[in-house]
Amino acid sequence: MTASQSPKRPPKSPAQRQRDYRRRHVGGQLSVIIDPGAKACLEQIAKTRGWTLRRTIERMIFETLQSTFQASTKPSAVTTPTPTSPRA
């Protein structure tokens, strides 16, 4: 064997190939423990809309971010009260 040749690696198992693929292509993984009631609500929303839990969480995040951004760019809905005329 010459210096430019490398030894052959054993073939990867399907699980190893899947793990490598996810590391290269998936944005990230999130593992959290949430309140059982919140989980039940999340599952109900997903079931009602016909979505996966993943899609439900992603949509909720994106919609919240969008509405938060829109609210922060709009003029304030709170108005300064106008002075009232003195009573006679």
Image (tube, rainbow, N blue to C red):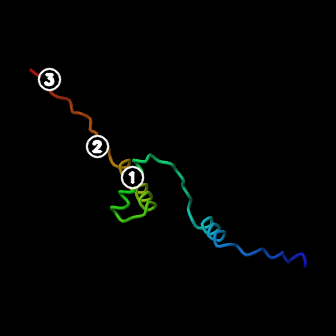
Foreground mark, 1 or 3, reads 1
**Which residue extends farthest top?**
88
In this rendering, is residue 69 above or below 21? Answer: above
> Percent x, y for residue 78?
28, 39
Could you say which quadrant of the image residue 2 lies in? Answer: bottom right
**Label 3 is placed on what type of residue?**
Pro
Q: What residue did someone put label 2 on? A: 77
- Separation of residues labelled 2 and 3 (CA atoms): 27 Å
Q: What residue did someone put label 1 on? A: 40
How many numbered discs? 3
**Label 1 is placed on what type of residue?**
Ala
Residue at x-position 26% and y-position 38%? 79
Q: Along the horizontal axis of the image, is 39 left or right of 33?
A: left
In this rendering, is residue 19 above or below 65? Answer: below
Residue at x-position 32% and y-position 43%? 76
Q: Along the horizontal axis of the image, is 26 left or right of 6?
A: left
- Separation of residues labelled 2 and 1 (CA atoms): 34 Å
* Quadrant that contains the N terminus: bottom right
